[in-house]
Image (tube, helix red, strand yellow):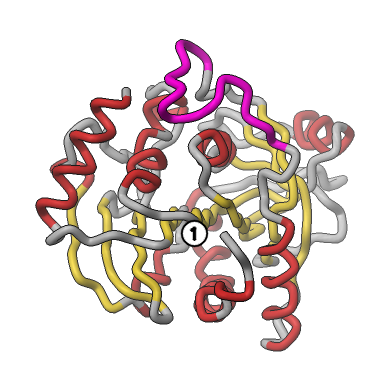
């Protein structure tokens, strides 16, 4: 894997005049609007990048975007890869390793998720403080010590300092936010009422089909992580509600401007934290 990472990094540097990002961003379903506030320098389709899989999900543009946000050099994934598309978790997280070796120190992830905390409402923004992983761990298999340790610590997977900073920003912008535990399951079917109840019992506040493998790999290779969910539907209610992908995208679009404002301001204030 190490050689493939370097091959991909060399390719991207050759196409971007050696662009070295400080921050990597993964933009999930309906959350691609952050690119609209970016001073875009380069755009490269996933299909053109060596060793990348190809996104097959509606609402995911499937490209890397290099540019500047709030004075910070960033690389953004417009779209991501999922276990339910038939790829292994080690393959869907390969781009995270590439982001690290391009020079990034911080990884910011966003996703759409189903709310299972009864206090949540559709279009709420939830800062992820922990997770429960029900997907195959992307670190299963041989470990290359050049990339990371065999047994990475996950006690602070979602950097507490960044959550505190984001809370302060949200207060000053008068944006209501939630906090909680993200449960990752495989999908692509949405959860049954019994599954929603189970995830709540074991400690989850929302459930989705991504993000956690990316976080595990990010921590394995030394990236600091901040992650946010947009609550796009509600499960575990007394009366089951049918969920469609279109409704998920619509709900995410409502929250998008608020999340964009928080992340822009966070990038301005990153010097307050030693990454």
Observer-nearest of 197 and 182:
182
Observer-nearest of 68 and 238:
68
Numbered disc 1: secondary structure = helix
Image location (x, y in percent) of residue 52: 26, 35
Observer-nearest of 275 and 21:
275
| Above/below status of 164 relative to 206 | below
Using residue 70 as the reference point, say whether residue 254 is left or right of it.
right
| Above/below status of 167 relative to 12 | below
* Residue in the picture at 76% in, 30% down: 195
| Above/below status of 52 relative to 227 | above
Image location (x, y in percent) of residue 141: 48, 11
Instruction: Please tell me in which quadrant of the rendered image residue 147 appears.
Output: top left
Residue 136 seen anywhere in this rendered image of the structure = no
* Residue in the picture at 43% in, 20% down: 144
Using residue 70 as the reference point, say whether residue 137 is left or right of it.
right
- The stretch of residues the image draws in magenta is 140-154
Instruction: Please tell me in which quadrant of the rendered image residue 184 appears.
Output: top right
Quadrant where the C terminus sits is bottom right
Q: Which residue is mark 1?
A: 249
Residue 37 seen anywhere in this rendered image of the structure = yes
Using residue 72 as the reference point, say whether residue 43 is left or right of it.
left
Image location (x, y in percent) of residue 65: 27, 61
Image location (x, y in percent) of residue 143: 47, 17
* Residue in the picture at 54% in, 57% down: 247
User: Total number of numbered labels?
Assistant: 1
Quadrant where the N terminus sits is top left
Instruction: Please tell me in which quadrant of the rendered image residue 118 appears.
Output: bottom right
């Amino acid at each position: 894997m190490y050689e493939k990472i370097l091959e991909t990094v060399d390719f991207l540097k050759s196409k971007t005049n050696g662009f070295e990002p400080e921050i990597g961003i993964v933009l999930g379903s309906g959350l691609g609007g952050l690119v609209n506030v970016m001073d875009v320098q380069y755009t490269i389709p996933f299909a053109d990048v060596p060793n990348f899989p190809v996104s097959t999900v509606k609402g995911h543009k499937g490209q890397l975007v290099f540019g500047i946000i709030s004075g910070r050099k960033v690389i953004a994934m417009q779209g991501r890869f999922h276990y339910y598309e038939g790829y292994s978790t080690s393959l869907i997280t390969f781009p995270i390793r590439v982001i690290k070796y391009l020079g990034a120190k911080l990884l910011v992830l966003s996703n759409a998720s189903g709310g299972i905390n009864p206090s949540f409402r559709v279009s709420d923004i939830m800062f992820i403080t922990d997770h429960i992983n029900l997907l195959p761990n992307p670190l299963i298999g041989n470990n290359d010590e050049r990339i990371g340790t065999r047994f990475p610590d996950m006690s602070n997977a979602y950097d507490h300092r960044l959550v505190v900073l984001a809370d302060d920003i949200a207060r000053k912008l008068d944006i209501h936010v939630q906090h909680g535990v993200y449960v990752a399951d495989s999908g692509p079917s949405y959860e049954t009422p019994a599954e929603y109840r189970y995830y709540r019992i074991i400690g989850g506040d929302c459930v989705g089909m991504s993000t956690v493998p990316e976080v595990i790999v990010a921590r394995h290779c030394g990236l600091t992580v901040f992650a946010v969910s947009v609550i796009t539907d509600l499960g575990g209610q007394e009366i089951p509600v049918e969920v469609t992908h279109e409704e998920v995208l619509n709900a995410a679009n409502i929250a998008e401007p608020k999340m964009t404002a928080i992340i822009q301001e966070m990038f301005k204030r990153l010097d307050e934290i030693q990454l």
